[in-house]
Amino acid sequence: MGKKIFSGVQPTGNLHLGNYLGAIKNFVRLNNDSENNCVFCVVDLHAITVKQNPKELRDNIRETVATFIACGIDPKKSIIFNQSTVPAHAEAAWLLSCVARMGWLNRMTQFKEKAGRDKEKASVGLYSYPILMAADILLYDTTHVPVGEDQKQHLELCRDIAQKFNNDYNVYDFLKVPEPLIQKEFSRIMSLKDGTKKMSKSELSDLGRINLTDNKDDIINKIKKAKTDTLPLPDNIDELVNRLEAKNLLGIYSSLTDLTLEKTVDKFKGKNFSDFKEKLSQVLVEKIDPISSEIKKLTEDKSFLDEILLDGQKKANDFASKKLRKMQEILGF
């Protein structure tokens, strides 16, 4: 029996290589497996936990859909929609807020990281959005959720909420308890300028990331300027422990070529960085340049993207509204 998969991406613009290798490449693989039922959600309600420019948000929603399609997700095989157009998400989040416990939310480390020192000034939404994330997942009888390390804790919370709802109302297995899908042989993608920091769209220097909208010249230039050290490439992966920039670039090559890190290290051992960077640039251009061209083409056709979102909304709303209604009946409404 196939998996029911749900995943969401925030439409905050500037999707980059880290998003592609960490999530979207895996979405494409899951989408291409005919046994899977996939729901890919542009989570615009999550995006507004931090203030957004309304016009940019609208553009970013379309650009995220364009990126999904340019990377190879087929909207005929999967549901693609934006969260705010399906009211069941916000309504279910409130119902589940009354099941979730403060102590559970207080343990969420991501809120502490995102809110920073002055958490009193963070929005209530930033604090409680893991409950909305649980609603997103549970409305579709999801069996599996692709997650990175930073979202594993939120999925645990989702599982706790589902189990408590089922136990409190004596409805065994009504809310399906989802399993994590964690990529094997995946290297976490770090900044090209600092191997200790994750590649991020919020990094001030554009040289720290490969955007999925970068062209061939941008990619070659960024890899040329990527931070390295003065030693040749190592003979084995144990030597990468204190060579974070080398580890990051070799990890990117591994993820793009579907090689293990050991095989990549063996392939380039003893070579200097200029030779390796040339090979890495070739692989990146081959993979990213066609995606970039397709994103640009698709974003110019707003009506096409809006049709995909409308079609996805109808399919998602049909399923989610029925699940919500059953939740309401269980609660006594």
Image (cartoon, helix red, strand yellow):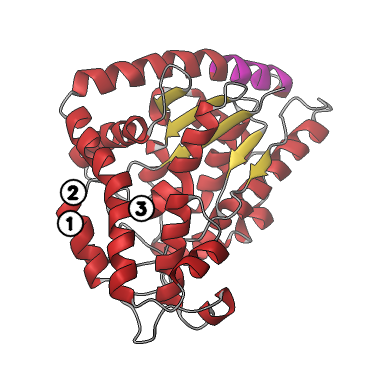
Classify 10 Å Cα crowding around label 3: few (below 14), some (14-19), many (20 and above).
many
Report, in whole angstroms, how far the alpha carbon at label 2 lies from the one at label 3.
Answer: 13 Å
| Residue under label 1 | 218
Residue 12 shows in the view: no
State whether the magenta stretch is mostly helix, strand or loop: helix
Q: Which quarter of the rendering shows the N terminus?
A: top right
Report, in whole angstroms, how far the alpha carbon at label 1 lies from the one at label 3.
Answer: 13 Å
Q: Secondary structure at mark 3?
A: helix
Three-letter code for the amino acid on which mark 1 is drawn: Asp
| Residue under label 2 | 215
Q: Which quarter of the rendering shows the C terminus?
A: top right
Instruction: Check the image and report above or below for 204 versus 289.
Output: below
User: Is residue 156 rendered to the left or right of residue 294?
Assistant: right
Tell whether label 1 touches label 2 (CB within 8 Å).
Answer: yes
- Looking at the rendered image, the disc whose residue lies closer to the viewer, 2 or 3, is 2
Numbered range of the magenta stretch: 321-330
Q: Secondary structure at mark 2?
A: loop
Three-letter code for the amino acid on which mark 2 is drawn: Asn
Q: Secondary structure at mark 1?
A: helix
User: Percent position (x, y) of residue 332?
Assistant: 71, 20
Q: Mark 1 or mark 3: which comes first in sequence?
A: 3
How many numbered discs sit on the rendered protein?
3
Residue drawn 45% across the image and 51% down it: 257
User: Percent position (x, y) of residue 223?
Assistant: 26, 65
